[in-house]
Image: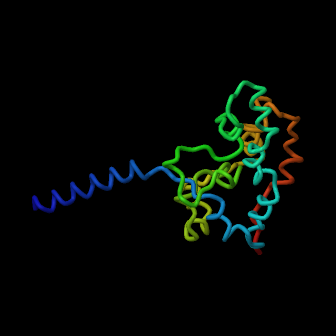
Amino acid sequence: MMKLFLHFSLFSSVFFFTAIVYGQNKYVGVRACRPCHATAKQGEQFPIWQKSAHARAYTTLTTSKADEIAKGIGFSVPAVEVVDCLTCHTVLADTKLLEKTFSVQDGVQCETCHGAGSAYKSMSIMKDHAKSVAAGMIEYIDEAAIEKQCRSCHNEKSPTYKEFKFKESWEKIKHPVPKSG
């Protein structure tokens, strides 16, 4: 009985430690989302993103114009190295939370708005909306919540801010799953 208790204790300790260390969802990158979200059945969400300015957001930081802007607001490094810029031009996360499939060069991608996808990326989870939300996928209850998320970057803090017209912008990037039936 004591041996069984020790095995159980050891298993519980390992399980608890693993849950703490690996429990946080990791960013898997847009390539992990693409296979399922490029289809008409899913609303061609990947192609919508791919054609958007969000897909090129990181690339804009690699230009000489971006470097001039960064220098103009007091940074001595290229824009692509400025945390203030990267925060809105890609997913900025601890490297321990980035899977090998993730690339910051993909700009503002699925997980920027929907959260790190390692726990909800599998087909068995994604086929059940409630399961995907329970596994960490961020769901927005209405357009006001979506607008709030958008304005976390599209705001006056940006040195290149232009009036943000949410309704117009949302029309360009929204990507609902078509209703079946």
Residue furthest bottom in the image: 181
Residue 114 in the image: x percent, y percent? 65, 52
Residue 28 in the image: x percent, y percent? 58, 58
Along the viewing direction, whichever of 90 and 4 lies nearer the viewer:
90
**Quadrant of the rendered image containing residue 68:** top right
Identity of the residue drawn at 78% across and 45% down: 60
Along the viewing direction, whichever of 87 and 145 lies nearer the viewer:
87
Which quarter of the image is occupied by the C terminus? bottom right
Along the viewing direction, whichever of 143 and 77 lies nearer the viewer:
77
Residue furthest top in the image: 74
Residue 165 in the image: x percent, y percent? 88, 41
Q: How many marks?
A: 0
- How is colour applied across the structure in the image? rainbow
Residue 90 in the image: x percent, y percent? 68, 46
**Left or right, residue 101 beside residue 159:** left
Which quarter of the image is occupied by the N terminus? bottom left
Identity of the residue drawn at 76% across and 36% down: 67
